[in-house]
Amino acid sequence: MEGSYDVIVAGSGIAGSLAAATAARNGARVVLLDRNDYSQTGKKTNWGWVCGDAVAKSHTDFITEKIGLSFGEPEIDLKVDGVYALSPDLEHKFIFDGEGYTLNRPRLAKKLVDYAKKQGAEHITKFEVEGPIIEDNKVVGIFGRDEKHEQVKVRAPITIDTLGIASMLRRKLPQNEYIGKEVSTDDIESTGRYIMNVELDGEDLRYYDPKNALIHLNQVLAPGGYGWVFPKRNRRLNIGLGVEKKSLDIRNQKLNKKDTLHMLIDDYVKWNPLIKSWEVDPEDGNGKGYWSVTVRRQQDSLVFPGYMGAGDSMAMPNPISAGGIGPAMVSGILAGEVAADAVSEKKFGMENLWEYNIKYNDKYGNKTAGLEVFRIYLQSLNNDLINYGMAHFITEEEAVELSYGRVPELTIASTFNKLLSGISNINAFRNLLFCVSGMKKLNAHYKSYPKTPKEFGAWKEIVDKEMKDVKEKFKPNPV
Ligand SMILES: Cc1cc2nc3c(=O)[nH]c(=O)nc-3n(C[C@H](O)[C@H](O)[C@H](O)COP(=O)(O)OP(=O)(O)OC[C@H]3O[C@@H](n4cnc5c(N)ncnc54)[C@H](O)[C@@H]3O)c2cc1C
């Protein structure tokens, strides 16, 4: 398969189908490879299309604006007004994100891959990608196995890696200063969820809100992560939670328990007093599943010679919400655009692909390092401190600003005037000030993201140093 393609896109999930569609629409000859057969397009694992299914409207609008593709039924399951985060004692509730949708992921995946094919991308299914072909320290294609399990090589000047969190391409890159091959387990949430048909008993907007997505912060129920109840249509819910391994271990040890992710999810369902009875939704065999999601900033560079990455393969989910659908959409489109430009100019060097780093950073990536700092801080708080903090540390407007990665000028003086009580609360507040100052530094630093690969090393050193300081200061402390 040499010379047939300009761009290989590996993985036809959200990021991959959009990258392939955009590159093909802009004139590149694109092949889109995936291990699934067409009927299971976008399926992440044997467990299914495991996801909370929630996406902000601003992200689907971005697709419409860029490539003219709009969304409705059946891929949009339900419109929601916003996302609320509740304190562990359920006394405080902050809006966390605006208008959006819960999706039908299998239908969305089909729609995106069909669109990519319509733009001219060739979709090859039942193809297992096994690694990159490297020549002269450059990616020049991929190797893998086709549907007959025969070894196949596909070569092209650009490979876009959209294989998701466990990418075999990223992990087999040569050691390099641009893209980390592995992600630390401290930056990963183990997650799982049910899509359930449910019979609800009564009304209580703290546990289920038909118009809003709810996030429950609770370090006992979901150590180092959170639980969620997202409404879907026809008496269905997407309900699940994520945990961070160290936080779970500490929590279990302190409470003398041996709870696993699976047990915690079942406990979380039982904890919800409105859920009277439920059954796993049978549609697409997608009602119950577990998978991982990263909660760190995206890879500091998204390109390597001959190689670009988008979506989960580049650790793009939002560090606070773990929302990765939006970043996968944005990055898929931007990667496809830059790849097509490189093809039309016949310039495939690192300098040409670098434009993608700059575009992604401008559009989304410049706030994620700050959000990573905020996530590490949050994981250092127990339930009492979260309750107290949501009541006394910040206003609702400030919380919203923080959750969007914009650092508010905390009304520190006035907050101090509220007279915080208790030494651990005062320490936690001081730590919040440290956290906010780290967020500010990183946000400012990302504003000067390197314009060329040459400036990258010095820029990255500062990111690494700042992140190391934060990780040394804040340790998981769930209970
Ligand atoms: C439990 C859970 C809940 C979540 N909830 C939300 C949420 O509510 N909102 C949100 O925005 N995000 C959420 N996320 C994250 C979101 O699901 C991901 O960020 C998103 O799916 C990323 O899309 P992607 O295209 O990058 O990767 P993926 O969706 O993982 O797609 C990767 C594709 O590559 C294919 N592939 C992988 N390896 C190979 C191989 N070796 N050979 C061939 N093909 C391969 C797969 O078959 C798949 O089609 C959640 C994640 C989890 C696990």
Image (cartoon, rainbow, N blue to C red):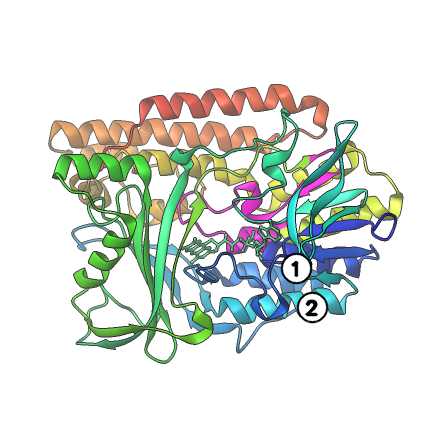
Instruction: Classify mark 2: helix, strand or loop.
Output: helix
Residue carrying label 2? 115
Among all residues in the image, which is located at the extreme bottom?
A: 234
Residue carrying label 1? 17
Mark 1, other Cα within 10 Å: few <14 / some 14–19 / many ≥20: many
Which percent across, then down, holds residue 181? 56, 32
Magenta stretch, residue numbers: 304-331
Mark 2, other Cα within 10 Å: few <14 / some 14–19 / many ≥20: some
Instruction: Kindly identify the amino acid type of the residue bearing the numbered disc 2.
Output: Tyr
Check if mark 2's residue and mark 1's residue have beta carbons within 8 Å: yes
Say if disc 1 is inside 8 Å of ligand 1. yes
Query: In the rendered structure, does residue 323 fall within the stretch colored magenta?
Result: yes
Residue 448 in the image: above or below residue 46: above
Instruction: Please say whether residue 230 is visible from this viewpoint.
Output: no
Residue depicted at 37% across the width and 37% down the height? 374
Residue 64 in the image: above or below residue 454: below
443 left or right of 85 in image: right
Instruction: Classify mark 1: helix, strand or loop.
Output: helix
Q: In the drawing, what numbered circle is on residue 200?
A: none
Residue depicted at 72% across the width and 44% down the height? 142
Which percent across, then down, holds residue 297? 50, 37
Residue depicted at 72% across the width and 22% down the height? 454
Quadrant of the image for the C terminus? top left
Residue depicted at 71% across the width and 57% down the height? 32
